[in-house]
Amino acid sequence: MRHFGVTRFLATLRRPEFRRGVADMAPASLGISAWGLVTGVAMVKGGLSVPLALLMTLTVFAGSAQLAALPLMTVNAPTWVVWATAFCVNLRFVVFSAQWRPFLVHLPRWQRVAFGYVAADLSYVIFMRRHPEPRRGSGQMAYFAGVTATSWLSWQVPSIAGILLVDSVPAHWGLGFAGVLALLGLSLSLLSDRGTALAAAIAAIAAIAAFALPFKLNIVVAIAAAVGLGLLIDNGDAPGRRAGEAG
Amino acid sequence: MSAADALITIAGLAAITVLTRSFFLFSNRDFVLPVWIQRGLRFAPLAALTAVVVPEILMSQGHLIDTWKDPRLAAAVVAAAWYGWRRGILGTILSGMAVFLALRLGLGW
């Protein structure tokens, strides 16, 4: 526990690189906040009780996976379909984690895993912009702490506000659609070339054509079609070079 | 879904977050995913998102919508246009919701 002692924690807060991380993350935090609010509202509108919604935001901490899982949970899709969908939506993080490894490899395992857990899309993008190469002693870990702490707070506070305040908004406004728009923006941010455009078109057609399948299996069909396409075409720009904008 | 089912689902989702975000951070030894797996998976995130989003915009009660007087259509078009113009998620949500709420509450679509 000595690494996370109170003295050490306070010392980190005073590091210039910590403050720099906070400052660099601040402009993006407005977008994260709006998305967190939307997700908080969507969780309760999707039928989760307030305690379960709070548990979800505080443990899952992955907006796109939460928003993708919610409509499936609402229609009682089988748990494995919900998990498979969330796993696929989160696959980009697997790629990011390989990029994080050289920066974190000097830490003990549980700290590496904890640091990986708090590092979402925007933290990755902003950190790598300032620190493209791993270098010990350059305040990188303090910067990392500043970026991820800002990202965590600007997600969790509005998300919890959305969960607690949702009943003050009439249901017929349909505010849950904001969650769909957030996912739409994230999907568009992943479109980078003809390959990705083709994959999106195939996934969209497959998801609609197979919609009558039970258990939301149309999503599994769409993913399978896109995996087939990925294996077939060979103009590979590496995944993960297309870091999405949102967290 | 029952509260117990939801609890299990949420616990699994949390585990998936840890597993994916820290996938290459668990091991003390270096390793890489085989290239063919990386190739197969490169479109999976986009496909999963698209497969969730598109039916939410284009379908109701299991069928493609048959009227253009659906606030979701105009909202999605405006939101996508905003994204193409400014590349910001916040503006995408706000512009789309402005259209959505104007049509739904203003015109009663």
Image (cartoon, rainbow, N blue to C red):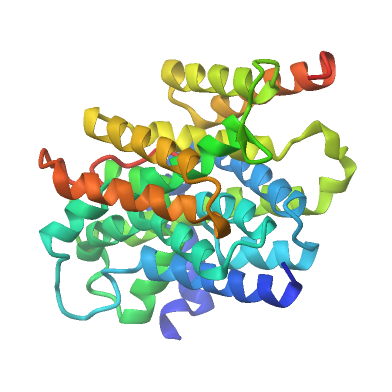
Viewer-closest of A172 and A64: A172
Q: Residue at x 50, y 18 (%)?
A: B82
Tell me the quadrant of the picture where the N terminus of chain A can be found. bottom left
Residue A61 x/y as whole percent = 55, 60
Left or right of B85, for residue A100: left
Residue A197 x/y as whole percent = 30, 30
Left or right of A115, for residue A167: right
Residue A34 visible in this rendered orientation of the protein:
no
Viewer-closest of B54 and B13: B54
Q: Residue at x 23, y 74 (%)?
A: A106
**Residue found farthest to the bottom:** A1
Tell me where residue A181 sits by quadrant.
Answer: top right
Viewer-closest of B5 and B92: B5
Tell me where residue A182 sits by quadrant.
Answer: top right
Tell me where residue A110 sits by quadrant.
Answer: bottom left
The vertical placement of A130 against A7, above or below, is: above
The vertical placement of A100 against A221, above or below, is: below
Viewer-closest of A41 and B4: B4
Left or right of A36, for residue A130: left
Left or right of A13, for residue A202: left
Residue A53 visible in this rendered orientation of the protein:
yes
The vertical placement of A44 against B89, above or below, is: below
Residue A158 x/y as whole percent = 68, 47
Residue B51 x/y as whole percent = 46, 43
Q: Residue at x 42, y 55 (%)?
A: A220
Count of marks overlaid on the render:
0
Q: Residue at x 23, y 28 (%)?
A: A194
